[in-house]
Image (cartoon, coloured by chain):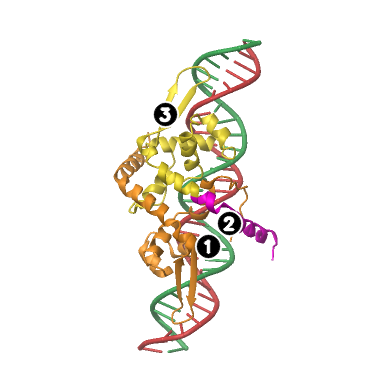
Chain colours: A yellow, B orange, C green, D red
Amino acid sequence: MYERKMEEDLDCGIRVALKVFSGKWKLCIIDAINRGIVRPAEIHKNIASATLRVIEMQLAELYFFGVVDKCTEDVYPKKSEYKLTELGRSLLPILSKIDKWGMDHADFVKERQSELEENAMKPA
Amino acid sequence: MYERKMEEDLDCGIRVALKVFSGKWKLCIIDAINRGIVRPAEIHKNIASATLRVIEMQLAELYFFGVVDKCTEDVYPKKSEYKLTELGRSLLPILSKIDKWGMDHADFVKERQSELEENAMKPA
DNA sequence: ATTGATACCGAATCTTTTTTCGGTTATTGC
DNA sequence: GCAATAACCGAAAAAAGATTCGGTATCAAT
């Protein structure tokens, strides 16, 4: 998958959890699957700004950690469906809290963000 | 602070939230401050595997997004104390859910993790 | 005046993650 | 046979993020 060089410390709950679901798109993918968007190509259409490759890779990691299950039907253009495991579903309350928090504060965060970008424009 | 190259999409709650508190140590730092560990040097002692520099940087980002407040007393060896803002406190329920999830599944995750590492050992 | 503690910053470097791109395989429809 | 579609993989390159290191500044104690 990839070989890390630095030691990891999984000694607090936060770091353990982040190990499993940090990554640019993992939570979005879990959310999509939860909403019934279960095939890689569909997830990709749904999360337009994520590349298909990264979705595949993050699905593989989620699968590795038992967050999602995969069933590949051996038919037609090759059909794979992912679904949440029990473990995956146990993340849903966290997911919805995070999502709600983000929605509630989206305007504020975007405003701060654009201030940053403005400053990056002007050299000095 | 730093200039990014790729466009960001803050169109879903999850991505907005992650913008604010993703980062290797941000949640741990928020947790520490919540537990009364409020000065950079102390936070550093508490989160041993994070460097002081990264704590400073992540504190700066949290400050930028209004998650923490800073008050620098202009005394003795220079005393800075960080505390959670209202916005920061609104993250605590998420934080505790994440932490609990991680604790509950720590054994399982560590086991999977060590499998990965074993496989990385053997070349083929 | 030197040392020690604290906070903080800039820049180079290194690690990790994501992106890009070019494959492979398998099946359907033309 | 040839194009299209879906899933997926490997590897190079790019980008993002973290680390290392060496600095500044301030005050207090020795």
Protein chain holding label 2: A
Within 10 angstroms of label 1, few (less than 14), some, or many (20 or more) residues? some
| Label placed on residue A108 | 2
Residue type highlighted by circle 1: Gly
Within 10 angstroms of label 2, few (less than 14), some, or many (20 or more) residues? some
Whether residue C17 is situated above or below residue A112 in the rendered picture: above
Q: Position of residue A95 (x, y in %)?
A: 45, 44
Query: Which element type, helix, strand or loop, lies under badge 1?
Result: loop
Query: Which element type, helix, strand or loop, lies under badge 3?
Result: strand
Calculate the distance from the C-alpha at mark 1 to the C-alpha at mark 2.
10 Å
Asked if badges 1 and 2 are on one and the same chain, I answer no
Q: Which residue is mark 1?
A: B66
Question: Which residue in the rendered view is the most extreme toward the left?
Answer: B107
Quarter of the image where the C terminus of chain B is located: top left
Left or right of A40: which side holds A118? right
Q: Which residue is mark 3?
A: A70
Calculate the distance from the C-alpha at mark 3 to the C-alpha at mark 2.
38 Å
Query: Which element type, helix, strand or loop, lies under badge 2?
Result: helix
Residue type highlighted by circle 3: Lys
Residue type highlighted by circle 2: Phe
Residue B80 appears in the picture as rendered: yes
Label 3 near label 1: C-beta < 8 Å? no
Number of callouts: 3
Q: Which residues are magenta?
A: A101-124
Left or right of D11: which side holds A6? left
Q: Position of residue B62 (x, y in %)?
A: 50, 61
Left or right of C10: which side holds B57? left
Residue A67, quarter of the rendered image? top left
Could you say which is closer to the camera, residue B24 or residue A45?
A45
Question: Residue, x 47% and y 41% (percent of image)?
Answer: A26
Answer whether residue A122 is magenta in the image.
Answer: yes
